[in-house]
Image: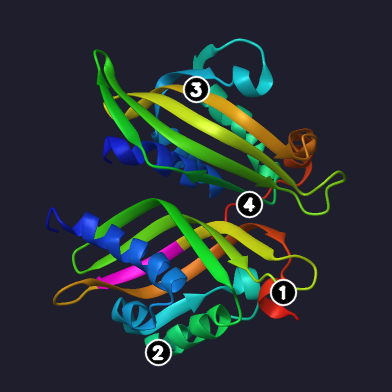
Amino acid sequence: MSEQDPAAVRDTISRYGRFIDDRDWDGLASILADSIRFDFTSLWGGEPERVTGIELVGRWRGMSERLDATQHLITGVLPEIDGETATVVASLMAVHRRASATGGPLWTVGGTYRFGLRRTADRWVIDGLSLRVAWVEGNQAVVSGG
Amino acid sequence: VSDADVLPRMLHAIDALDWPAVRAAFAGQVRVDYTSLSGGEPETLPVGDLMARWQGLLPGFDATQHLSGPVLLTDEDAGVRADTHVRGYHHLRGADGGETWGVYGHYTARLADGKITELTLQVFYQEGNFGLPALAVERAAISPRRPAG
């Protein structure tokens, strides 16, 4: 592990939130691995799955385009680096806003992210992403309804 | 563990009910000051007593989240002072009076050799269901939440 690795890993996690909120989908694709272990079952149900980076960008893009704004506040970022791979635990508060939503404009999710990352030639990319939801507040129809 | 990570690591461990990791963040004796939340006086107690107290409360919630802010480190004569904002969300599904109790404020810790020797919570404000901690204590005794795999 080099001295720069923890900061580089933290940067990738910060960029993940920024790229989604900025709708920078090329940027988001650039920090995702080709294949990602993905587990949002605590929010959406279903089963953990493996998705391609392109697929994940498409999902977030599809959700984002229905919304007026999102804010992903990612804090308490703790990297554990093991050679060419890393895991990160971080806290998330994600606010989703759609002014026209029936039932209120905001839906907020709080929980814990677990990221897996691996080192490539010039950066750390995300190859695992799970969310354990702690609390949800507001109107879920902001993202799912009319 | 770098001094800057001690508080966030301890708070993540609390949310995960990872008691060995919570324990590892503290020195053998801890001065805790939660008077701005619950009144009373600051106290100094063995870390085992502090663990027992938290183990009698936190597993009674369905989930907690301690969202920490930037950690500020200040060198002091006796060690290091670590400061961070915190937003503590405590969730209990179906609770009468509301499912969430929010405690928002600031933690100041003092560290010696990377271990917390003092922990002070300064509450800025609370919101939601103030009766939730009492319900959580009851539930922790009857049907505590298990740590997530």
Given the image, what chain letter belongs to the residue carrying mark 1? A
On the rendered structure, is B119 left or right of A12? right
Residue B115's place in the image compared with A66, above or below, is above
Q: CA distance from mark 2 to mark 1?
A: 29 Å
Magenta extent: A114-118
Picture quadrant of residue A42: bottom right
Q: CA distance from mark 1 to mark 4?
A: 40 Å
Identify the amino acid type marked 4.
Arg
Identify the amino acid type marked 3.
Thr
Question: Which residue is situated farthest in the right direction here?
Answer: B96
Task: Characterize the local packing of mark 2: few (<14), some (14-19) or many (20 or more) Cα atoms within 10 angstroms.
Answer: some
Viewer-nearest of labels 1 and 4? Answer: 1
Which residue is identified by label 1? A100
Identify the amino acid type marked 1.
Ser
Please indicate, yes or no, whether residue B17 appears anywhere in the rendered image: no
| Disc assigned to residue A26 | none
Q: Residue at x 59, y 41 (%)?
A: B88
Identify the amino acid type marked 2.
Ile
Given the image, what chain letter belongs to the residue carrying mark 2? A
Q: Secondary structure at mark 3?
A: strand
Q: Residue at x 70, y 66 (%)?
A: A105
Viewer-nearest of labels 4 and 3? Answer: 3
Q: Secondary structure at mark 1?
A: loop
Task: Characterize the local packing of mark 4: few (<14), some (14-19) or many (20 or more) Cα atoms within 10 angstroms.
Answer: few
Q: Secondary structure at mark 4?
A: loop
Which residue is identified by label 2? A54
| Disc assigned to residue B120 | 3
Q: Same chain for labels 3 and 2? Say yes or no.
A: no
